[in-house]
Image (cartoon, rainbow, N blue to C red):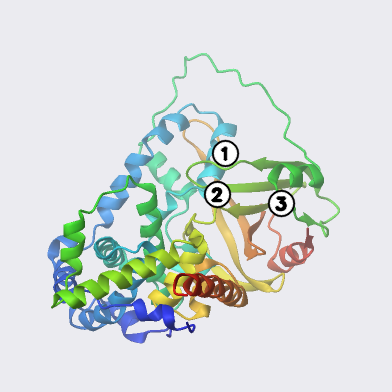
Amino acid sequence: MSTQTTPWRKALAEASSAEFEDLYREQMPRIYNFFRYRFGNNALAEDLTATTFEKAWRNRHQYRHDLSAFTTWLFTIAQRVAIDHYRRPQREVALDQALDLAAPENPEEALQKQNDLQQLNALLSQLSARERELVALKYGAGLTNRAIAELSGLSESNVAVILHRTLKTLRKAWERSHG
Amino acid sequence: MDDNFLSNFREPPRPEFAEALYQRLNAPSQRLTLHKRIKQFMESQTMLRKRLASGFSLALLILLAVLVFSPPARAYAQEIISRIGNLFISDAPTYAEQFENKLQDGLLPTSDPNAEPEVIEWQPPTLLTVAEASSQAGFEVYELVDIPAEYELISRGIMPPNEDERVIRVSATWQSPQGPLVFSQTTWAEDAGPHTLPVGEAPAEKVSVQGVEGIWIEGLRLSTYVENNAVAPKYANLLIWQKDGFEFWLQSSAGLSQAEMLTIANSATP
């Protein structure tokens, strides 16, 4: 994934509502899945995604498009939103609400998706906060190692090494739990 | 389980959620709230103004130095003009300039001329060796090897972490007839997130230092509070880079050039 997404730059610079929609459709799923992988809760992921985009939209004048890639800037906001979430008192999400929010078209699909999310959570909960953050950026948001390096302050090779090590750990855990 | 297995857990957001959020973002109430943010920032500085009113120049100078590093920068940032790692450089007025503006606007209370002067006991600055500083900081402290002869080391100390910044900073100061040189090495908490330095109109230029990308800021506006609400402007040249998990600042109020500062910075070794 490129962090040099030209249409976003234009939208941020000109705040064009017409173009904003396309840009929003492009980036929002990435942010949403970043939070899903980070916290393993669909309802919370929606909540934090909304917070991230509201902050980005309000502060779009802070972004200077020729010096910083928009995706990096947006994910920096998302990371801060995640940190703020950790710091504030945890809000309970009712189970029926969480299921309802995640409900797709039919019960079988709903069950499958719920199982998927539980599996993902079980795997990722074994990781340290930093490892889970990197996995969420890589596999949830689909960012490149270079973009992750920019966001995390690590070198690109360091990101690759940590992700490789983390995947090895997850693979072992997966093999243990699935024979 | 291949490496892409983890990507298979992705799913698109619910269409109704995506639509509702999009509509909310486009609602007029979500439009620009900069004034509100500035107001919040000003309110957060109320305590600060009270402290500044004591009128002691030394205390104010220290306070301004602290302000340059403090998190409220995030609330005042206007536009990000550059970045290295998780440090964002914005063109918002420097904290010194914000303070001066408030001073000129009469927002700061003045001290009572008939009040008894508060006695402040002079404390000599801490002067740790590199080994002592390393031991107290819990990491290897860098030392500047190539310092001009007229500079004398007068302090080296540790700023312990606090709840807001969550940093450990080792700072050393050299004094010369032309002014001081300050070198700091900072480590941030793993989840501390980005921080912002407002530089006002001072130009920020990308440079190479210690083999990594750094930022050179020339003429960063600082201030020295004198008395009777008078301000003597001061400026500093600043070199910032991040390496080995640390953020380094080299600051000269003696007008050292970029080349001179780079020579000094490149001599930093653990």
Q: Could you tell me how far apart the alpha carbons at marks 2 and 3 are, in whole angstroms?
A: 30 Å
Q: Residues within 10 Å of mark 3 (few under 14, many from 20)?
A: some
Q: Can residue B112 be seen in this view?
A: yes
Q: Which amino acid does label 1 sit on?
A: Leu
Instruction: State the quadrant of the N terminus of chain A.
Output: bottom left
The residue that disc 1 covers is: B61
Q: Can residue B232 be seen in this view?
A: no
| Tag 1–tag 3 contact (CB < 8 Å) | no
Q: Do the residues labelled 2 and 3 touch (CB within 8 Å)?
A: no
Residue shown at the point (14%, 60%) measured from the top left: B29
Amino acid at the residue labelled 2: Leu
Q: In this view, does A179 lie to the left or right of B181?
A: left
The residue pinned by badge 2 equals B222
Percent across and percent down for residue B224 are: 56, 41
Residue nearest the viewer, comparing A54 with B174: A54
The chain letter under disc 2 is: B
User: Residue B139, labelled with which disc?
Assistant: 3
Sequence-earlier tag: 2 or 1: 1
Q: Which residue is drawn at 63% across and 48% down?
A: B169
Residue located at (73% from left, 30% from top): B124
Q: Are marks 1 and 3 on the same chain?
A: yes
